[in-house]
Amino acid sequence: MPTSRQPVDALAMGLMLLLCMLWGLQQVAMKATAPDMSPLMQVALRSGIAALLVGAVMVWRGERMSLRDGTFWPGVVVGSLFALEYLLVGLGMRLTSASHMVVFLYTAPLFAALGLHWKLPSERLRPLQWLGIAVAFGGLVLAFSGHAGSTQHVNTNMLLGDALGLLGGMAWGATTVVLRSSKLGQAPATQTLLYQLVAAAVLLLPAAIALGQADIRPTAMAWSNLAFQAVIVSFASFLLWFWLLKKYLAAQLGVFSFLTPLFGVGFGVWLLGEPLEPRFVAGAGLVLLGIVGVSGHTWLAQVLLRRKAAQHVKLTP
C-alpha cells in the first residue's frame, strides 16, 4: 500500500467522470420517479438498503465498530447532518427542478472551506480561494434572480425549493467540517459511511410518514430507481470515492467536483425537459467557477507555477 497519495492519472480521471455522471443523474432520477415515491421516501429506503450492504462488507472484512474510540458522537453528528441534508433535498425537490437542486446542493465545498478555515489552522483560505468564494456567492445571487419573468406562484415555490437546496449544501459542508476536525476523519471509510446511512434511514423514514410522503406506487420505474439509488449511488459510488481519496491527491480529485452539477443540469434538460433561465445559467456558471477556485486552488497554483517555469526556461539563453 502506498505511503503517499499519487497524482491523478487516466484511471482516476475516468472513474471521476463516471462518478460525476452518477451523482448528477441521481437528482434527476429522484425527480422523475417522485410521482411514484417521494424523494424523501426514496432517500430513507435507499439509505437503509445501502447500510445493510455496507454492514455486510464490514463483516466480510472483519471490521468492527467501537463505541470507545472517540468516533461515536462525531458519527451521530455526521449522521444527523447527512439526514438533515437529504430532508432539505427531499422537501426542496417537490418545489424546484432537478437542475436547480443539483447546482445549489453542490455549493457544499464553499461552506466546507469556510468552516474548515474557522476550525483548523492548517485549512486557512488562500487569496485564490477567497476570490473563488466571492465569485461563487455572486453567482448564487444571480442564479436566485433567474426566476424573473415567471408567474408569482411558480417564482415563490422555486425560490423556496432553491433555498432548501442551498441549505442542504450548507448541511453537507458542515458534515465535511465535522469529519475533518474529529476522530471520525481517521476511521475506515465504511464506518464513516455507515453512520450516515443508518442515521438517514432511522430519521428520514418517520419524517416521510409524518409529512405524508410515505405512499409508494409499486411501478417498475420506482423499484428500478430505488435499486439504482441504493446499490449504485449510496453504496458502490461512495466506496469508490473513498478508495480514490486514499489513493490519489484529494485536491486534484476535488477539481472534478464541478462536473457533477454540469451533468445534473444536462440530464435535467435532456431527460426531464426542464427549462433553463439565462440568469440561472450565468449564475450557475459563476458558482462552478468559484468551486473550482476553492477546491482546486492547489492544482491551479501548480499549473501556474509550471507554466511560469516553462516560460522562464524558454527565455533563458
Image (cartoon, rainbow, N blue to C red):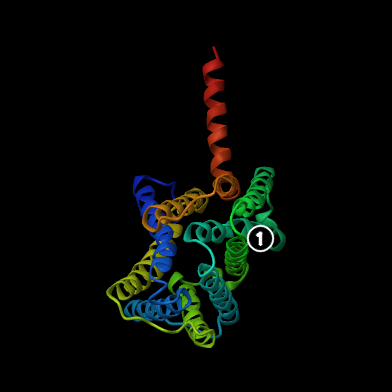
In the figure, 96 relative to 52: above or below? above
What type is the residue that disc 1 sits on? Leu
Residue at 53 percent across and 69 percent down: it is 89
Image quarter of residue 272: bottom left
Q: Secondary structure at mark 1?
A: helix
Q: Position of residue 114 (x, y in %)?
A: 68, 58
Q: Residue furthest top?
A: 317
| Image quarter hosting the N terminus | bottom left
The reply, left or right, for residue 253 in relation to residue 128 is left
Q: Read off the residue under disc 1.
A: 116
Q: Position of residue 41 (x, y in %)?
A: 44, 79
| Image quarter hosting the C terminus | top right
Q: Residue furthest left?
A: 220
Q: Please name whichever residue, 105 or 53, is drawn nearer the observer in this view of the structure.
A: 105
The reply, left or right, for residue 100 in relation to residue 31 is right
Residue at 54 percent across and 73 percent down: it is 91
Image quarter of residue 123: bottom right
Whether residue 281 is visible, yes or no, is: yes
Image quarter of residue 60: bottom left
Q: Please name whichever residue, 214 or 307, is drawn nearer the observer in this view of the structure.
A: 214
Whether residue 243 is visible, yes or no, is: no
The reply, left or right, for residue 41 in relation to residue 288 is left
Report the number of numbered marks: 1
Q: Position of residue 223 (x, y in %)?
A: 31, 76
Q: Position of residue 147 (x, y in %)?
A: 60, 54
Residue at 40 percent across and 60 percent down: it is 25
Crowd rating for badge 1 (residues with CA inside 10 Å; few <14, some 14–19, many 20+):
many
Q: Please name whichever residue, 79 or 282, is drawn nearer the observer in this view of the structure.
A: 282
The reply, left or right, for residue 176 in relation to residue 137 is left
